[in-house]
Image (cartoon, rainbow, N blue to C red):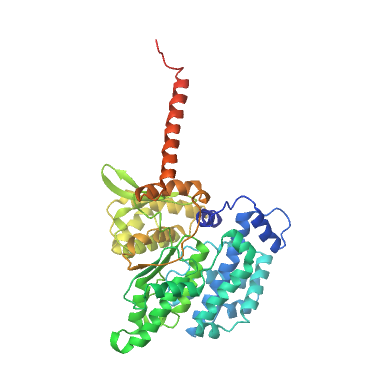
Amino acid sequence: MFFQQWKLLFGEVCGYDIDTPTDRITKLAEYYGILEAPKPAELMFALHSYYALFIKLLSAEIVAFFHKLPTPVQRLLKASNSRKLKEEIEDLESGSIFRYLNITNFLEGDFFSWYQYSWDDSIEKIIRSIANEIDEYNPGTLSEDPEGSRDLLKKLYEQLFPKTVRHDLGEYYTPDWLAEHVLNELQYAGNPEKRILDPACGSGTFIIAAINRARVWYEKNRETCNYSEGDLLRKILSNIVGFDLNPLAVMTARTNYLISIRDLVSYVEKVEIPIYLCDSIVTPSEYGGIDTYLTGEKKLTKELKTSVAKFRIPLEIATSGKSLAQYCELLESCVKGRYEPNEFIQRCRNEGVKISAEEMHIRLYKQLFRLDEHNQNGIWARIIKNAFAPIFCGKFELVIGNPPWINWNNLPNEYRSDTEPIWRKYDLWPTYLLGAYRIFRSFLSMSVAIHTWKLAGGWDLS
């Protein structure tokens, strides 16, 4: 399930067919000593899973060290047997250390925890090897040097994907100097009141550059701005925001974001890292992958397509990001608690969530409940929450970033179909392309007419 949903999202951002072996994939497989014909999607998913596990451990090490907590790596190294090691990994993957620090969404929409459900001796050996390697690093040094830790993430990624392979795969990191240059051109001095969005944030290069400037601005203006450290962090979390469709990029960006605010976390009650796994093009609106279901003239739900199902989200709970987040948390906890549908409805009402169209909420809840019974749940409530993020983030004064450079022809067919109305609405298609499109539609209509005529036995011209 995790693999299929990852493939659906990654296929929209990578710019190539991840199911068809190519020279570039063969080159990557050879780099890892895989001699038989490689399966591209499986190979990429495995590499992403490894990288994700590393950055989860790295993030947990840094926050644990900074807040004087036992580090996860220390606990992994002390695990005396396979069962104990698996328990420690499950604790890490559940996000317990982040929840302890009231960081609510660090692992939200994480597709890379699948390995704990396939636990065996070989996985145990790999985990112990990773733990031993990470133990060589000093988290204090990483915590004190966020630039160095960002470089560490980049260096690891570059070693996972050699330069020639990265080039062929279209995998690029925006250099820090370019992010700084863009911010200079925009004359962004770091005022945390100014709202900034990177709608295709990748690993967060532009986002982190903006946060660093906000922190420098605060130090220079501490006496006159009347912000506390908590005020500063709340403004950063509210005003410096990133979106991306690549699950691994989202996790990397959240890691970099967390490192950049590591010392401010204790000044606020709750931290939601504003990096969301969502599509900034096909948003929950009139068109595309999330569309509107009509009953009469009244819009009641929006549809979200996933690899396992289409979810219809009742609009009455999608009035704000806060109400949607609360609703999604209740969906997840009630499914895990095996609540009956009517008990879920009552709990929503008890906690102040507006519920009137009971039948729609019950239908969605039963859908998630059935998926859970077939071991296909665990992420969908959070995927729903993230998908709606572009609607509730408000307006931004600056939109910055390095968008994915993917040719129209290399987009998946379904995604091209979903985004086609947007291209036409904003008149983005070149005239010749629009003309070709109209000719194609005319030809298609004529073909359908001829086919219908043949089925009918031709026209009676007498």
Image quarter of the C terminus: top left
Q: How many marks?
A: 0
Residue most toward the front? 432
At 28% from the left edge and 59% from the top edge, which residue is drawn? 354
Which quadrant is home to the N terminus? bottom right
Q: Is residue 233 above or below residue 306?
A: below
Expressed as whole percent of the image width and height from the top left, the position of residue 89 reads 57, 70
Query: Is the residue 403 above or below the residue 150 in the image?
Result: above
Q: Quadrant of residue 168?
A: bottom right
From the viewer's perspective, is residue 131 above or below residue 354? Answer: below
Front-most of residues 277 and 28: 28
461 vs 167, left or right, is left
In the rendered image, residue 284, in percent from the top left (x then y), is placed at 36, 54
Residue 363 visible? The answer is no
Among the 4 quarters of the image, the one containing residue 277: bottom left
Q: In the depicted view, which residue is nearer to us: 201 or 119? A: 201
321 versus 356 height, above or below: below
- State left or right for residue 1 relative to residue 286: right
What residue do we see at 58% from left, 68% from top? Answer: 51
Whether residue 392 appears in this view of the structure is yes
Residue 35 image point, x, y percent: 73, 57
